[in-house]
Image (cartoon, helix red, strand yellow):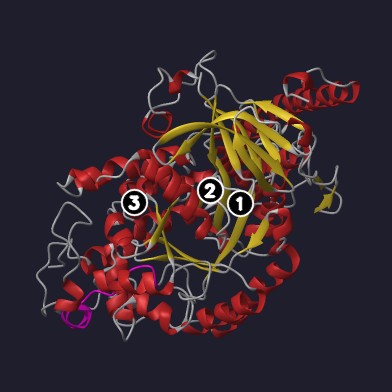
Amino acid sequence: MSDRGQKRKTPEEQASKFVQRSKVRILACCIFFASLAPAEPTGHIEITECLCGRAAFRFWSRVAWAWLGGPFAQVGEPIVWTAQSGKAANLRQDPIPRARRTLLSNALVPSADGYERKDVLLAEGKIAKISEAKSELDSAAEVVVDCSDKLLLPGFVNAHTHSSEHWTRGLIKPLPLELWVSQLYRHEPRGDEGWYGKDSHHRTPAEALGVSSLLCGAESMLSGCTAILDHIAIRHLDDLDAVVRAYKALGMRAFVAPMLGDDPVLWENFIPLVPDCAARNAKCSCNGGLGKGGSFRTQVARPDSEKTKKMLELWEEAVKRFHDPENGIEIVIGPVTPYSASPELLRGAVELRKKYRLCGHTHLLETRGQAMQARQWFASGSAVQHLLDVGFLQLPGTSCAHTIWLEDHELAMMAKAGAVCVHNPLSNLILGSGIMPVKKALDAGVAVSMGCDGACSSNGQDILEALKLATTVACVTTAEYRDWPTARQTALSLAARNGYKGVGMDRAGRLEEGCVADVTLWDLTSLALLPRTDPISSLVLGSRTQAPGAGSTLHSSWVRGIRVVSEGSLCGLDLPSLREMLTRAQPEYKCPSTTDPATDPFTKGLEVEYRAALGLDGQERLVPVPDKVATYPSGRVLYDATVR
């Protein structure tokens, strides 16, 4: 049975489509009446009041979550918001479908020295058989897809992102990570107190995280991802429930890593200490810093032991409730950084990983400031050694995001531990963090995967953008052009094979019999892949014209053998409904100038202390900076990285 023969819709399918369109129209009517509403009220929020301002954000995220439930095709498990109870109620649709025996006939697949035509049979969630094109496999298939003008590739993995950041993408002015992250939390739609304000749950329902996860997953899938690792900041399990439901609806393989730490005060351990802080405080007790009376901090903030316990309990409860590998959802233990997760929290994370056989994920040496912190924070002077000492790094399925400022001996330690580095080139350039030494890592025996990072630091979740940048930026790191990577290496080795390796899946990310059936099909007649040269190079290094008639570059995707993208459209989500919601959720445009650190007393102090620590304030040091704190590996940035 061919796909072409399936285009005539059954009466049931036609009725379902009518219902979906009706819901979009009704939602549009609701939005129209919302525009007539008065200003945002105070006090308790009733449905009739939730129509504009921050209340509109709360209301429309709930509405979208409810109305998107209809178009959640076959793989969804949507929820609706019930105003009476104030809780989300399950509306379970059809169960997640079984994987159909699908023959991808006459597909162009990459080979060792070029391309060749193959028939590929997907069955029981695996690549069951690969044989010469036009073989006699038709009788073994329930569905036959003619791939004569299609390129078949293993699915890519977006190996590091933060889906909740979608609500602030494009907003924050150019800032380094340490200053940027404070603006991220300040300007997410949760009030001035950010995520952790006492009323934050009331101000923004958990469904908002579900909606942003839908957007994050949709963008990733439409650029060729079949799996994602979402390092997500959550407040409680309701947040996580919404995120998991979103990924189940989309049908992609999701590794969800609750991003937790146990700093007593948010941001306090996000920046290094000023090397000559004591001398400066002695000279002037009011430097505009974060310490008492405006002094500079002189020691690291100690962890909150009660918070440590709560974070470990939250991780474990998340595993018990949501870890479901057979249906494509895995909980990953994800401490935020080695600096904002105490040794006690990291050791507890290790025990949980051993107990439940879980993957682990964290940020590692993303910035020069974090490299300075490692030398100040840890007795070994190394964040990599610290993660080894607590037992986190060497467990199977460990991946570390960014890994820019590692020394050569630390790369050797990563290789010995078997940990995977996640390259996020776009966000690392936007935040001025530097360029990861990918070739050095690969030469040292470290597997490197690819990530988009959060949508606010990269402004999107297009994995092909990340692949293009990773392939090209490497060409200015060495004059030896024979070492420059090809588009094929970046796509097949980093984004596919190593992407799955980073989440503990060795039989994945390759077009081989027995590997999981996470595959993508690309339209070779789309404008972006013409004229015919090398299709992978065109895909990675080219552009994708969005005009009608240009053709969707991505034709189809399968995850666990289940079709989740068909003819360029998501099977599990009605995108027009999502667009309607996002259009109205934040009705006013904002200016990046509102994210200047000087606009808030705390972030102003954060900036003053950060600039003093990195030697950017123009002040003479009162005491010499020790060599171990002052010097860093070369080649990560285009300026002298020495801290003067």
- Return the residue at label 3: 428
| Residue 154, picture quadrant | top right
The single residue placed furthest to the top in the displayed view is 549
Task: Determine whether, in the image, residue 572 is placed left or right of residue 213.
Answer: right
| Residue 552, picture quadrant | top right
Give the amino acid at mark 2: Arg
- Look at 39% across and 38% down and name the residue there: 113
- Return the residue at label 1: 515
- Look at 53% across and 44% down and name the residue there: 166
| Residue 320, picture quadrant | bottom right
The residue segment tinted magenta is 269-283
**Residue 261 x %, y %:** 51, 72
Q: Earlier in the sequence, mark 3 or mark 2?
A: 3
Task: Determine whether, in the image, residue 377 is placed left or right of residue 457.
Answer: left
Give the amino acid at mark 3: Asn
**Residue 615 x %, y %:** 17, 65
